[in-house]
Amino acid sequence: MRSKNRSNPASGQSDITTAAMTEDFDSMILDLAGDDFTGLWEFVWGAAANVPKADPQALLDRLRSDVELLIRTGKLRLYRGTRFTGEQELVADQDAAALLAVPANWAPPEVGRDHLRVLTNEATP
């Protein structure tokens, strides 16, 4: 269930886009992160495919809010890595919000650049 005190980055969008933006992305996030480490950029791709007319910044704000809440409630864990070979390290929950606030962390990483991925607490890599 959504927290009632969350901001709505979809405000200012058309009625159709607003309705789609206010749908929970939680299910998509948990589904993608349930089986394997999932890059933050993969959530952007999934959300953009579901709400193609949404403002990209509003979409990113909504995703950041949802991922942050899922981390705070213990449903997701955030990891940092540089390769995709299982070397990722768990990020402390208290550091998650600052890392999620960096727009570059939501873009596909360049080779050798740090990237952030999540995994549900129930999944085992």
Image (cartoon, helix red, strand yellow):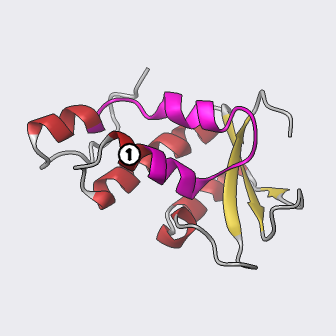
* Relative horizontal placement of residue 8, taking residue 111 as reference (left or right): left
- Secondary element at image label 1: helix
Name the quadrant containing residue 14: top left
Residue 41 position within the rendered picture, expressed as x and y whole percent measured from the top left: 54, 58
Q: Is residue 46 above or below residue 80?
A: above
Residue 3 in view in this figure:
yes
* Relative horizontal placement of residue 24, taking residue 110 as reference (left or right): left
Q: Is residue 36 magenta?
A: yes
Residue 65 position within the rendered picture, expressed as x and y whole percent measured from the top left: 44, 46
* Relative horizontal placement of residue 79, taking residue 47 as reference (left or right): right
Quarter of the image with the N terminus in it: top left
Residue 113 position within the rendered picture, expressed as x and y whole percent measured from the top left: 70, 78
Q: Count the marks.
A: 1
Please name the residue that numbered disc 1 is placed on.
Answer: 49
Name the quadrant containing residue 121: top right
Residue 15 position within the rendered picture, expressed as x and y whole percent measured from the top left: 10, 36
Give the amino acid type for the residue marked by disc 1 in the picture: Ala
Q: Is residue 62 above or below residue 33?
A: below
* Relative horizontal placement of residue 86, taking residue 73 as reference (left or right): right
**Magenta-tinted stretch:** 21-46
Q: Residue at coordinates 58% horizontally, 67% vertically from top-left?
A: 108
Q: Residue at coordinates 76% horizontally, 79% vertically from top-left?
A: 112
Camera-side residue: 7 or 120? 120
Q: Residue at coordinates 33% horizontally, 30% vertically from top-left?
A: 23
Residue 97 in view in this figure:
no
